[in-house]
Amino acid sequence: MMTPGERNLITDVGGLRVGNAADAAAKTGVTVLTADRPFTAAVHVMGGAPGTRETDALAADKLVQGVDALVLSGGSAFGLDAASGVMQGLRAMGRGYQVGSQRVPIVPAAILFDLLNGGDKGWADSPYPALGHRALMTAGPVFDLGSAGAGTGASAGPLKGGLGSASLRLPCGLTVGALVAVNALGAVTVGDGPEFWAAPWEAGAEFGGRGMAQAAPPLLEAQLPRALGESTTIAIVATNAQLTKAQAHRMAVAAHDGMARAILPSHTPLDGDLVFAAATGTQPLTEPLAQEMQLGHAAATCLARAIARGVYEASEAPGDVVPTWKARFAAEG
């Protein structure tokens, strides 16, 4: 039986830390996942409109075998600058890939679009390097969910999106966690009701315990609710297992099943849906094939739960253009 970890956060994977930073006026933010030492990472993109930085280095045939941090950011392409602030902070700590006398921190990043959410985006200088640096400096084992970090200005269909996380401990001793900024074109709830598509995988009442309404998945409306490039769900799944980059990539691929369980539709041409995988490598695989399958299933389950949890935990803020789940449904009991 798989049960959530102590915190029910991705940081139940020992050694990982997460930090958030936000600009309330701009309704945007950054989330950083890091660790005390480099970790194996991979990525898989299934959306049609991704925005990324340094993801080519994660391919199995590329030189670098470990990364120093992963960044999830709002701001569309502007948000890729958040990784620069993270790099500066890591460099000051003496972190990074050694090249002669220099160290170059390896910080892959992915962004979501939150430029039309009612926040003030009229900045003269991009806020994202400073947000990235602040998120890194505040990274720890406990962090806020909902309207925090990269989820600050996110939306999910007709509701406000958010930052979500969840974890599972496997019977074999491995731990899996997920971290996600939900900013989807599709809906995370069933029809016009409060029930989440991810309800069958809920642990306890982590996103309201509302069960599952009996309804067929809706067809996508002919008139799309959002314009090109305005949606993206970006996520990280992590484990303490000792994985190669290729094995981590397979875990990222499998984790996309969780996105499809929790968001309908997902992976559309208008979303930049992406999943990073991270492996700290403290626990060797004793039965590689069976445990790789278990890791993929657990990653998908955690991601589905984290998506619903991020939307459930979103909070209201002045100028919001869509309601939160709690504002829309909490009064229904």
Image (cartoon, grey):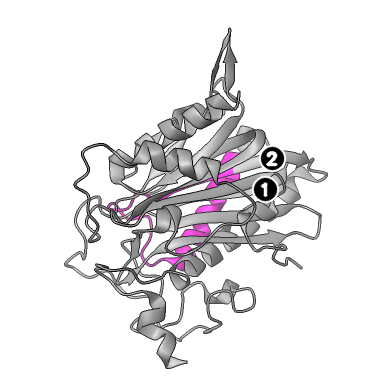
Give residue 10's quadrant in the image: bottom right
- Find the distance from the CA under tag 1 to the CA under tag 2: 6 Å
Q: Residue at x 38, y 58 (%)?
A: 152
Quadrant of the drawing holding the N terminus: bottom right
The numbered dot on residue 280 is: 2
Q: Residue 162 appears at what percent x and percent y?
A: 42, 62
- Magenta span contains residue 257: yes
Question: Residue, x 59% and y 72% (percent of image)?
Answer: 201
Q: Which residues are magenta?
A: 248-277
At which x and y percent is residue 269? 29, 51
Q: Residues within 10 Å of mark 2 (few under 14, many from 20)?
A: many
Q: Classify 166 as above or below 45.
A: below
Task: Answer with mark 1 or mark 2, whichever residue precedes in sequence.
Answer: 1
Residue 180 percent across, percent down from the top left: 49, 55
Residue type indicated by callout 2 = Thr
> Going by the picture, which residue comes out furthest to the left?
223
> Mark 1–mark 2 contact, CB under 8 Å?
yes
Q: Position of residue 163 (x, y in %)?
A: 46, 59
Q: Residues within 10 Å of mark 1 (few under 14, many from 20)?
A: many
Is 67 inside the magenta-drawn segment?
Answer: no
| Left or right of 273, for residue 300 | right
Secondary structure found at label 2: strand
* Vertical comparison of 258 with 189: above or below: above
Q: Which residue is mark 1?
A: 239
Give the quarter of the image for residue 298: bottom right
